[in-house]
């Protein structure tokens, strides 16, 4: 459904260390820096980028926005969350755990990256 996601950061190096850690837990290679200083992650034809804002203004996070990353188990979500905390992220909302309603059961963990973007590690139970 998505071709790419881009988040802004004033300190791309700090954000790259954070994303290398949490995306590494999910089996992704470290990001590469392009000639414009953007950290780029690729998988299955999709892109995730971290960049300083093109307009030169300070980076801000999306109010109400969340970027979800898929995991293969609750344990992988926990490892993703721990890697985020260890690399400059902040745990937010409820602690990692099961969230469910009558039609869906998920294991979720929420973080803010070093630039304040809201992230969610997600495992969907079969």
Image: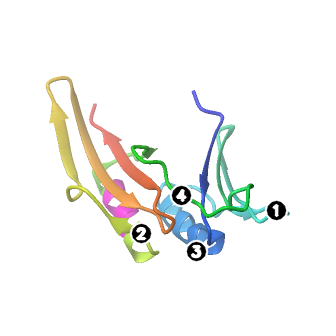
- Tag 1 near tag 3, CB within 8 Å: no
Q: Nearer the viewer, mark 1 or mark 4?
A: 4
3D distance between C-alphas at marks 3 and 2: 10 Å
The image shows residue 38 at horizontal and vertical percentages of 73, 61
- Write down the region rendered in magenta: 76-83
Badge 2 marks a residue whose secondary structure is loop
Q: Viewed as shown, does residue 79 lie left or right of 56? A: left
Assess whether mark 4 and mark 2 are in contact (beta carbons under 8 angstroms).
no
Q: Are marks 2 and 1 in contact (CB under 8 Å)?
A: no
Sequence-wise, the earlier of marks 3 and 2 is 3
Q: Residues within 10 Å of mark 1 (few under 14, many from 20)?
A: few
Quadrant of the rendered structure where residue 95 is?
bottom left
Reply above or below: 24 against 101.
below
Q: Quadrant of the C terminus?
A: top left
| Label drawn at residue 89 | 2
Which of pointers 4 and 3 indicates the residue nearer the eye?
A: 4
Q: Is residue 49 or residue 52 the one in the foreground?
A: 52
CA separation, marks 1 and 3?
Answer: 16 Å
The image's mark for residue 36 is 1
Q: Earlier in the sequence, mark 1 or mark 3?
A: 3
Seen at 67% across and 61% down, the residue is: 57
Q: Magenta segment, principal secondary structure?
A: helix
Q: Between marks 2 and 1, how big is the CA–CA gap?
A: 24 Å
């Amino acid at each position: 459904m998505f071709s790419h996601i881009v988040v802004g950061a004033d300190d791309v190096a700090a954000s790259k260390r954070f994303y290398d850690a949490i995306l590494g837990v999910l089996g992704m290679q470290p990001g590469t820096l392009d000639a414009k200083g953007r950290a780029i992650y690729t998988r299955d034809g999709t892109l995730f980028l971290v960049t300083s804002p093109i307009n030169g203004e300070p980076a801000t996070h999306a109010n109400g926005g969340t970027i979800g990353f898929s995991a293969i188990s609750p344990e992988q979500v926990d490892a993703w969350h721990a890697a985020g905390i260890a690399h400059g992220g902040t745990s937010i909302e409820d602690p990692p755990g099961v969230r469910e309603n009558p039609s869906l059961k998920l294991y979720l963990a929420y973080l803010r990256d070093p630039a304040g973007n809201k992230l969610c590690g997600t495992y969907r139970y079969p």
